[in-house]
Amino acid sequence: EAQVTQNPRYLITVTGKKLTVTCSQNMNHEYMSWYRQDPGLGLRQIYYSMNVEVTDKGDVPEGYKVSRKEKRNFPLILESPSPNQTSLYFCASSSTPRGNQPQHFGDGTRLSIL
Amino acid sequence: EDQVTQSPEALRLQEGESSSLNCSYTVSGLRGLFWYRQDPGKGPEFLFTLYSAGEEKEKERLKATLTKKESFLHITAPKPEDSATYLCAVHPGGSSNTGKLIFGQGTTLQVKP
């Protein structure tokens, strides 16, 4: 089954404790992206990747890091999480490098940072 | 600045009562406009892609249309199972060859039996 898998689905942690949210897709897609979703603000793009070793900033990259060492994986790293990063996070992938084909989304990761 | 605005924020309909959701956009060029459906606790699910003004796509009770400034998602004779949040997203073009995707804030639709 074609899917985007995120882990963990839920996480409660404390300020400053480094964490990684993993994302994996099994569709051999070129493009992957991370979004955060907040009430009243909608989905906002954090980072995206058009291919292995190619990443670029979205609209809200501050406080986040990403890497794309393999085509199927695109982890999101919070090196020093803060409470304002409490949010619902989605990973997505698309078949074309610029992502201008439909994106397939994971089921989300709910992060709470105390 | 590239921007996507959806209206209304929330919409309540009776079963069978047709209506339309609006997505207005201002972007430097348009490489594609997408409609997604999002159910509570789930990731967005793809519905339609529109690429040029005048284009229309249909799927069951849903029909998406596109002009140079906005897109509409028409819902004909909705059923309770159509209740969800509908998201519009724009892939801007212009001179930069980016992978950015800009979402509107969504319209939450509730259809009562």
Image (cartoon, rainbow, N blue to C red):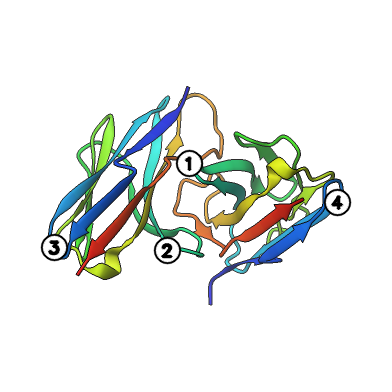
Residues at marks 4 and 1 touching, judged by CB atoms closer than 8 Å? no
Residues at marks 3 and 1 touching, judged by CB atoms closer than 8 Å? no
Which residue is the site of mark 1? A40
Which residue is the site of mark 4? A18
Question: Image check: A41 left or right of B87?
Answer: right
Instruction: Please say if B42 is above or below A57.
Output: below
Parent chain of label 3:
B
Which residue is the site of mark 2? B39
Question: Image check: A30 left or right of A101?
Answer: right
Three-letter code for the amino acid on which mark 4 is drawn: Lys
Q: Nearer the viewer, residue A29 or A47?
A: A47
Density class for disc 1 (Cα within 10 Å; few <14, some 14-19, many ≥20) is few
Which residue is the site of mark 3? B77
Q: Secondary structure at mark 1?
A: loop
Parent chain of label 1:
A
Q: Nearer the viewer, residue A52 or A62?
A: A62
Three-letter code for the amino acid on which mark 3 is drawn: Ala
